[in-house]
Image (tube, rainbow, N blue to C red):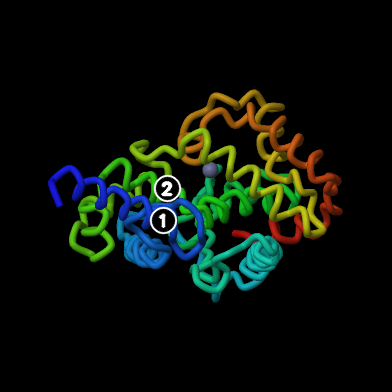
Amino acid sequence: MNRFKLGFVFGLFLLALACNNDDGEVFSPFFSWKDDVQLGHQVNDQIRNDTTGQFPILDEDSFPEAYGHIRRILNTVLESSEIRYKDRFAYDSIKIINDNVLNAFATPGGYIYVYTGLIKYLDSEDHLAGVIGHEVAHAERRHSIKQMEKQYGFALISAVILGNDPSLLAEIVASLAGTLGTLKFSRDNEAESDDYSVRYLSSSDYACNGAAGFFRKLEDEGRCNESGEWLSTHPDPCNRVEAIDNKAGDLGCKTTDLDPGSYQDFINSLP
Ligand SMILES: [Zn+2]
């Protein structure tokens, strides 16, 4: 076989890999969902062991009621039949960070962090369910690892997964938390996560356009162009309300919020 033919066959091989992962969808040809879990595990360890005070995690033993609420909301989102990695990703490890910023993020492999500032800012449990649905979608659709592979390349991300590049790991943690703007989700990833948030909530009792509630409130308060944390990794928040509402219209799902009483109980259970 000459060099050209060899190259052609190798190209076909890569294409076959790219098209035939365990989900039958085109994802990274190099990283499987198990790599997402492993990378998420590294990121999660880094956050738990952080000594700089950036991630003041709310202690679950001291605030069992707050964790009861957030797990109940997350589990409702995860009941959607569209969730693929419920038993394989680390959704059970959800943590609340006691910091008054409007932020939430998900690592590859489904470690989710929600800040008390965001929980208290929202007016309804439906809106928090919508934001959690959006973060679950980033994990489920494996947006971060694909973005990281594009940005840093296969070799560097492999080293992080194996625990061999602590400085890049620290950079990735900062990017995911939005304190360092080196890793931005693309507009397509954002639109896809909004879309999936509506789909996940459509089979629940929540208003399926819950994610739009957060953006609507920012718009009402004239905070659409604010920077920092969630807003730095999620550009143009206020331009997304219409698409979310349109998706809810397409699916014909319920768009009225639940009674706000139980959500106030959640807020009252926070420090
Ligand atoms: Zn997002």
Q: Quadrant of residue 236?
A: top right
Residue located at (73% from left, 46% from top): 210
Residue position marked by numbered label 1 in the rendering: 55
Q: In the rendered image, is residue 54 in sight? A: no
Which one is closest to the eye, mark 2 or mark 1? 2
Residue located at (58% from left, 42% from top): 192
Label 1 CA crowd tier, 10 Å (few <14, some 14–19, many 20+): some
Q: In the rendered image, is residue 65 in sight? A: yes
Q: Quadrant of residue 114?
A: bottom right
Q: Which mark is residue 176?
A: none
In the image as oriented, which residue stretches furthest toward the bottom?
Answer: 61
For the residues bearing labels 2 and 1, Cβ distance under 8 angstroms:
yes
The spot of residue 257 in percent (x, y) is 83, 48
> What amino acid does circle 2 point to?
Ala
The spot of residue 119 in percent (x, y) is 63, 51
The spot of residue 175 in percent (x, y) is 37, 44
Q: Is residue 114 above or below residue 87?
A: above
In the image as oriented, which residue stretches furthest toward the left?
Answer: 2
Q: Is residue 57 above or below residue 102?
A: below
Label 2 CA crowd tier, 10 Å (few <14, some 14–19, many 20+): many
Which SS class for mark 2? helix
Which SS class for mark 1? loop
The spot of residue 21 in percent (x, y) is 44, 61
Q: Quadrant of the C terminus?
A: bottom right
Q: CA distance from mark 2 to mark 1?
A: 9 Å
Q: Which mark is residue 177?
A: 2
Task: Describe residue 234's horizontal placement relative to residue 219 as left or right.
Answer: left
> Is 215 or 15 nearer to us in this picture?
15
Residue located at (13% from left, 47% from top): 2
Q: Earlier in the sequence, mark 2 or mark 1?
A: 1
